[in-house]
């Protein structure tokens, strides 16, 4: 539940891919993510470890730290406005931003509270845990990553 997780991912990514702009091959990316998320190192991701990811993501999205992610906060993080962007492009970007908010179910006028955001993990986790042993192993992990719908690097 600490911030180490994102630091671990960022460090691992920085070490492996020092040249910014080179996208990690998905197999390597997934291996690094798995390593970072499997906090107790038992080779599987349990619910508390999976929930921890969403807590970290929530903390990033909740810019003003009031325990609620608004559309404005999430939109600004997911697709930040570019300085000096032409009006036409800015409109396209705004449309894309709105699509992302809908995709991640964050397009809510009242915002999304932390409990609700973290709880969504339950459905994704159950879907990923194909053999129903309460853990997500390496072969099931790609489903978990897919379930985060691009919120992970
Ligand atoms: Ca584990
Ligand atoms: Ca907030």
Image (cartoon, rainbow, N blue to C red):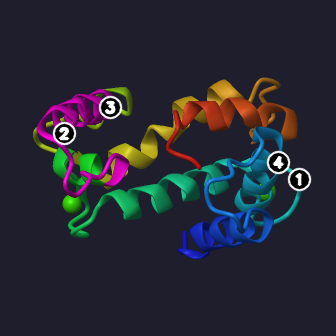
Local SS, label 3: loop
Residue 90 - label: 2
- Ligand 1 lies under 8 Å from the Cβ of mark 1: yes
Kindly report which numbered mark, 1 or 3, lies closer to the viewer in this rendering: 3
Q: In the rendered structure, does residue 87 fall within the stretch colored magenta?
A: yes
Q: Nearer the viewer, mark 2 or mark 4?
A: 2
From the viewer's perspective, tell me whether residue 79 is left or right of residue 1: left
Is residue 137 in view from this perspective?
A: no
Q: Earlier in the sequence, mark 3 or mark 4?
A: 4
Q: Is residue 54 magenta?
A: no
Rendered image: mark on residue 28: 4
Whole-Å distance between the Cαs marked 2 and 1?
A: 44 Å
Residue that numbered label 1 is attached to: 43
Q: Residue at x 22, y 35 (%)?
A: 89
Pointer 2 or 4: first along the chain: 4
Q: Which mark is residue 105?
A: 3
Whether residue 120 is visible: yes
């Amino acid at each position: 539940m600490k911030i180490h997780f994102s630091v671990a991912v960022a460090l691992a990514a920085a070490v492996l891919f020092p040249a910014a702009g080179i996208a990690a091959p998905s197999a390597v990316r997934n291996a690094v993510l798995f390593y970072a998320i499997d906090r107790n190192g038992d080779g599987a991701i349990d619910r508390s470890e999976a929930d921890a990811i969403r807590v970290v993501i929530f903390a990033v999205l909740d810019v003003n730290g009031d325990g609620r992610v608004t559309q404005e906060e999430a939109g600004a993080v997911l697709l930040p406005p570019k300085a000096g962007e032409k009006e036409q492009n800015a409109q396209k970007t705004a449309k894309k931003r709105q699509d992302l908010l809908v995709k991640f179910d964050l397009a809510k006028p009242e915002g999304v509270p932390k409990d609700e955001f973290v709880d969504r993990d339950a459905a994704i986790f159950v879907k990923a845990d194909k053999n129903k042993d309460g853990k997500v192993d390496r072969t099931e992990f790609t489903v978990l990553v897919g379930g985060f719908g691009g919120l992970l690097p």
